[in-house]
Amino acid sequence: MKQYSIVTIAIASLATTFAVACSDKEEALAELQKVEQQCQAGNSDKAREIMFAAAEKNESFRKAYHFSTQGLPDRAYVQPCGPVLVQLKGQLND
């Protein structure tokens, strides 16, 4: 059996974590683009649906969504094509 050093294992783990984090953020940005497209088409209800679904399935989007909607009394009535969208863009593009 081949033995690996702790450094080799740590580097492999870090690289895997980085790859997963990058793909998660890329997916979040793709979902954000879908929301923006619906907003540009004037379909805020569909944009809201996409936003909620993305927040459920994507960790990066969920974190940005929660940051962007904190302080709102009811997230079910979020206007996705206004300040929340601007906040999401800022959070996901950092």
Image (cartoon, rainbow, N blue to C red):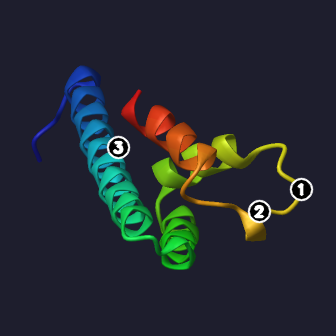
Above or below, 28 against 19 in this view is: below
Residue at the farthest left position = 2
Q: Nearer the viewer, residue 51 or 60?
A: 51
Question: Left or right: where does residue 63 sit relative to residue 57?
Answer: right
Which label number is shown at residue 21?
A: 3
* Residue ID at (24%, 43%): 19
Viewer-nearest of discs 2 and 3: 2
Q: Are marks 3 and 1 in contact (CB under 8 Å)?
A: no
Checking the image for residue 40, the label placed there is none
Query: Which label was assigned to residue 75?
Result: 2
Looking at numbered disc 1 in the image, what kind of residue is underneath it?
A: Pro
Of the residues under marks 2 and 3, which one precedes in the sequence? 3
Whether residue 40 is visible: yes
Q: Quadrant of residue 33?
A: bottom left
Residue nearest the observer in this picture, 11 or 6: 11
The front one of 87 and 59 is: 87
Residue 63 visible in image: no
Give the structural element (helix, strand or loop) at label 1.
Answer: loop
The residue most toward the top is 7
Q: Position of residue 63 (x, y in %)?
A: 59, 46
The label number, if any, that marks residue 73 in the structure image: 1
Residue at (85% x, 63% y) in the render: 74
Image quadrant where one finds the C terminus: top left
Q: Is residue 6 above or below residue 60?
A: above
Q: Secondary structure at mark 3?
A: helix
Amino acid identity at mark 3: Ala
Rounded to the nearest whole Å, what is the CA distance between mark 2 and mark 1?
7 Å
Q: Secondary structure at mark 2?
A: helix
Where does the image place residue 61, in percent across and percent down from the top left? 49, 52
Task: Please tell me how crowded label 2 is: few (under 14), some (14-19), or many (20+) other residues with Cα within 10 Å.
Answer: few
